[in-house]
Image (tube, coloured by chain):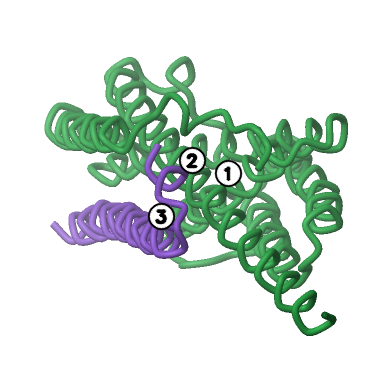
Chain colours: A green, B purple
């Protein structure tokens, strides 16, 4: 089994501690966002959805960045750990992208009057979601590890590059969705809540990727054991 | 007041998704560790 970044240094107990810290950070940041921010002039209290929608989107983007790095490194160095890291990050990215879309839909209904519209930001994000589903489907269809890793690295890079299109879509095609929110563009009354929630989501992201990466490594071990057993059975039959 | 329905839905959905995924990952890990332990690879399964 090739080298790994994580299991040598991160024990199960450390995972649990990180999970508890992430959970506590999320509870604290959300409570602060819900209680301390004043209603927005136009959106009223609906503005509070920003504290979960925007950090979810940023975390998804970061997860895709990990997919990109893992995929490029795999194609360059051909080490399995990079492929497993990309796959772990892709699954987390899928969860966060789906959550981002659902939260945007909940926010869109009272502010735009519709649950869904083919706005460029929404459409490009939906395309990103479909590409990620495709990436994970590809991994489950191809059995041979090296071929699976090469093909999924190519799709992973393509999907990750689509994040740039998603990010810039609100500037390239200015339609319904507002331009990017960040602590520097929102009202100072909302900046702290946004920063803290972004930090909490970052911790959740790290926790998820570490956990999923560990599961991916163990899955490969199980797969390798099954292959070895099949080989041994084949040899026995041959003899 | 009706706007709070959407806020509660958004925060509720966030928690449901994140907690459900965390539980799913934990269950998957435990299953894999058990599987590897049963195959005599316990040392690798619990570093």
- Mark 2 near mark 3, Cβ–Cβ under 8 Å? no
Q: Position of residue A209 (x, y in %)?
A: 49, 40
Measured in 3D between alpha carbons, the distance from the residue under mark 3 to the one under mark 1, in whole angstroms, is 21 Å
Could you classify mark 3 by the number of other residues whose Cα lies within 10 Å: few (under 14), some (14-19), or many (20 or more)? Answer: many
Say which residue appears at 34% left-offset and 58% top-offset. Answer: B30
- In the rendered view, tell whether residue A15 sits above or below residue A188: below
Q: Which residue is mark 3?
A: A103
Q: Position of residue A97 (x, y in %)?
A: 53, 52
Quarter of the image holding residue B35? Answer: bottom left
- Mark 1 near mark 2, Cβ–Cβ under 8 Å? yes
Quarter of the image holding residue A63? Answer: top right
Label ID, residue A209: 2
Measured in 3D between alpha carbons, the distance from the residue under mark 1 to the one under mark 2, in whole angstroms, is 6 Å
Label ID, residue A9: none
- In the rendered view, tell whether residue A173 sits above or below residue B15: above
User: Please, which chain is the residue tagged with disc 3 on?
Assistant: A
User: Please, which chain is the residue tagged with disc 2 on?
Assistant: A
Q: Which residue is mark 1?
A: A89
Q: Quadrant of the N terminus of chain B?
A: bottom left
| Marks 3/1 same chain | yes
Circle nearer the N terminus (1, 2): 1
- Front residue of A7/B4: it is A7
Q: Secondary structure at mark 1?
A: helix
């Amino acid at each position: 089994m090739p080298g790994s970044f994580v299991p040598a240094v991160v024990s199960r107990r450390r995972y649990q501690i990180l999970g508890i810290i992430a959970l506590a950070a999320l509870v604290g940041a959300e409570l602060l966002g819900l209680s301390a921010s004043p209603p927005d002039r136009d959106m009223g209290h609906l503005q509070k959805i920003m504290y979960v929608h925007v950090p979810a989107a940023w975390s998804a983007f970061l997860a895709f960045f990990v997919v990109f790095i893992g995929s490029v490194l795999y194609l360059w160095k051909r080490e399995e750990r990079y492929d497993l890291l990309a796959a772990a990050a892709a699954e987390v990215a899928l969860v966060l992208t789906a959550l981002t879309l659902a939260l945007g839909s909940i926010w869109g209904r009272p502010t735009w009057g519709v649950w869904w519209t083919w706005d460029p930001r929404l459409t490009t994000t939906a395309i990103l979601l479909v590409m990620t589903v495709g990436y994970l489907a590809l991994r489950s269809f191809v059995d041979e590890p090296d071929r699976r890793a090469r093909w999924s690295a190519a799709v992973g890079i393509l999907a990750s590059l689509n994040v740039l299109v998603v990010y810039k879509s609100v500037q390239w095609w200015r339609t319904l969705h507002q331009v990017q929110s960040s602590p520097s563009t929102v009202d100072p009354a909302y900046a702290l809540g946004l920063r803290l929630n972004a930090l909490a989501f970052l911790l959740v992201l790290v926790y998820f990727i570490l956990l999923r990466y560990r599961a991916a490594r163990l899955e490969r071990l199980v797969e390798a054991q099954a292959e070895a057993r099949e080989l041994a059975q084949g040899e026995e039959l041959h003899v | 007041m009706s706007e709070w329905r959407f806020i509660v839905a958004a925060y509720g959905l966030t928690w449901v998704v994140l907690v459900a995924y965390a539980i799913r990952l934990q269950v998957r890990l435990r299953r894999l560790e058990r599987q590897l332990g049963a195959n005599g690879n316990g040392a690798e399964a619990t570093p």
